[in-house]
Image (cartoon, helix red, strand yellow):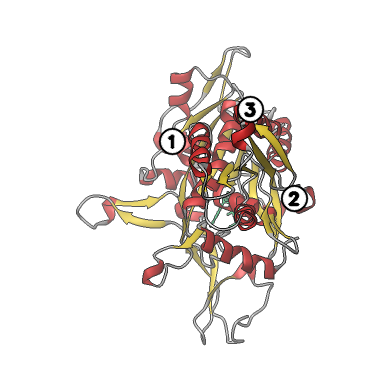
Amino acid sequence: MTTPEQMEKIVSLCKRRGFIFQSSEIYGGLNSCWDYGPLGVELKRNVKDAWWRSVVYERDDIYGLDASILMHPKVWEASGHIEGFSDPLVDCKKCKHRFRQDHLDNTEICPDCGGELTEARQFNLMFKTFMGPVEDSASTVYMRPETAQGIFVNFQNVVKSSRAKVPFGIAQIGKAFRNEITPGNFTFRTREFEQMEIEFFVKPGDDEEWLHYWKNERFNWYSQYGIKQENLKLRKHDDDELAHYAKECYDVEYLFPFGWSELEGIASRTDFDLTQHQTFSKKNLTYFDEAAKERYIPYVIEPSAGADRSTLAFLVDAYDEEPERVVLRFHPKIAPIKAAIFPLMRKDGQPEKAREIEEMLRPHFKVMYDEAGNIGRRYRRQDEIGTPFCITVDHDTFQDDSVTLRDRDSMEQVRLPISGILDTLQGRLEKSSD
Ligand code: ATP
């Protein structure tokens, strides 16, 4: 497990090397909001791409969607968010700090100053805003607190336009907003975040089987992309934790330095959402199953993951300290930069040759060129950002058209003909995701 001291080093590495910056930093920062820098944006895109590839491209039963963030206010009445999307909030009368009561372990005094706490009150987590030029209640809209509802309201559109047949799913990646009472732990809990959600529609009665299928499928995805087995677990929700509509739910949890915490929830939601939207919209949201000659409202299995949380887990899990170096051991598919190209010396045509190789590789993957400092330092700089391969041009390159390929993890160096670099890298990247 990563220690809290290592976590501090990860946070500072993130800033120093351009993974994650505090939002609006030059103005003193905005609490719980973060910006992904040049390397962070690549890392998070790779995480989202790996998810999309595994749930949309590698299957024939899931359709993609990108719904808008602002939705009709009735959506949130139907989904229960206006009424019930709240956490119990308590304030400290002395230091004024706020806490989620359910995070306080039954204590009645403020954990920060020992002061007296107020009674709990329900605090709605949705951000409100106004649509149009007049600030009246008629034009109140909400920033979506989850992407899921954009999927439910498009259920019939997807069935009709894509001739989708149950069982099938709809997948979406997008921003969600929650006015969390206690955001924190770096990017783990923020007020603006990205979700990666699937609603998978099944025939009532088949839900149990599909829940078990999806909980295994999603659990395996994290280890497929390099998260260590010992830091991952599946936890079944106790009955008293279940939302009122949920039949059964599992969380994929990761062992962060602050304890086991949820990366993704896989819930069996019955026909709750579609039924609610059918009632509130007065539109028919039933499905006609031609094979069974039956009409029904499908049941839903929902694997709901956080893009930022899993990016953080990939970062934390990849972090490794050795006596001589710090390494981010990212899976090559997740690594922000796949290869760095160096001239051993800044002379004798080596920089030009290295640039040629960089240009040859650039259309295929994210690569970078570096000629600053001695070669050992350049390797360390790449290790620290998790680049799996380094390619060095040297004096011999001009004799035999070959370069040195160095592997991040084993630090092994092999000689390789320039003509074979692309195939070798492509092969190593593909092999790594078997
Ligand atoms: P928590 O109990 O941690 O508040 P939740 O159970 O309310 O999370 P869900 O509503 O199940 O979360 O959301 C699905 C996923 O969205 C979570 O597993 C998480 O990865 C992500 N997520 C939810 N809230 C946040 C947040 N405030 N910041 C970052 N990611 C979040």
For the N terminus, the quadrant is bottom right
Q: Percent from the top left, x then y, of residue 378?
A: 60, 54
Whichever of callouts 1 and 2 sits on the residue coming sooner in the sequence is 1
Q: Nearer the viewer, mark 1 or mark 2?
A: 2
Of 255 and 410, nearer the camera is 410
Q: Element under label 3?
A: helix
Residue with the mark numbered 2: 232
> Circle 3 is placed at which residue position?
420
Q: Amino acid at mark 1?
A: Asp
Q: Residues within 10 Å of mark 3 (few under 14, many from 20)?
A: few
Instruction: Please state which amino acid type lies under the numbered disc 2.
Output: Leu
Label 1, label 2: how many angstroms apart (C-alpha)? Answer: 29 Å
Q: Is residue 6 above or below residue 42?
A: below
Q: Hey, which quadrant is residue 211 in on the image?
A: top right
Q: Is residue 248 visible to us here?
A: no
Residue 13 seen from this side: yes
Q: Position of residue 282 (x, y in %)?
A: 40, 32
Q: Does mark 2 have its CB less than 8 Å from ligand 1?
A: no
Q: Earlier in the sequence, mark 3 or mark 2?
A: 2
N-terminal of the two: label 3 or label 1? 1
Neighbor class of circle 2 (other Cα within 10 Å; few <14, some 14-19, many 20+) is many
**How far is disc 3 from disc 1 in space, using C-alphas?**
40 Å
Spot occupied by residue 385 in the image (x, y as percentages of width and height): 60, 53
Mark 1 crowd level (few <14, some 14–19, many ≥20, 10 Å Cα)? few
Disc on res. 66: 1
Q: Which quadrant of the figure contains the C terminus? A: top right
Task: Write the residue at 73% across / 37% down.
Answer: 216
